[in-house]
Structure formats: C-alpha cells, structure tokens
C-alpha cells in the first residue's frame, strides 16, 4: 500500500504519494468518522498491514 497513489473527490485525478505519517493521519480521521461496521473493516485493514 505504501506504493499506491491516492486521490479524493475534491481533487479527482490528482493522485498523490503518501508516507506513513500521512497515512496514519488519514486512518485516524477515518476511524473517527465511520460507523460500527466500517470500524471493523478499518481495524481489519490496520491489523493486516505489513511493515511500512
């Protein structure tokens, strides 16, 4: 995942690289916004991340 590029709906087509600090910040924000089912999915993603 560290070699993926990311974009958001406000910047469609503008895919940017990330680093571990920015990725962690995004995951933290996501955790605060998701419902219970989404939290389970998010925790699954975080649990299964390999070493960055």
Image (cartoon, rainbow, N blue to C red):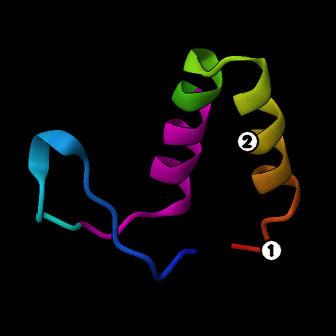
Say if the magenta span includes residue 40: no
Mark 1 → mark 2, Cα distance in angstroms: 15 Å
| Residue 30 figure quarter | top right
Q: Secondary structure at mark 1?
A: loop
Which stretch appears magenta? 16-28
- Quadrant where the image shows the N terminus: bottom right
Q: Secondary structure at mark 2?
A: helix
Residue 19 appears at what percent x and percent y? 46, 63
- Residue placed under numbered mark 1 in the picture: 50
- Residue placed under numbered mark 2 in the picture: 42
| Residue 32 figure quarter | top right
- Quadrant where the image shows the C terminus: bottom right
Q: Is residue 27 above or below residue 5?
A: above
Say if the magenta span includes residue 25: yes
Q: Residues within 10 Å of mark 1 (few under 14, many from 20)?
A: few
Residue 49 appears at what percent x and percent y? 78, 66
């Amino acid at each position: 995942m560290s070699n993926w590029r990311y974009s958001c709906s406000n910047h469609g087509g503008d895919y940017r690289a990330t680093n571990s600090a920015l990725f962690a910040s995004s995951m933290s924000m996501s955790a605060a916004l998701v419902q219970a089912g989404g939290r389970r999915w998010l925790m699954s993603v975080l649990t299964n991340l390999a070493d960055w």
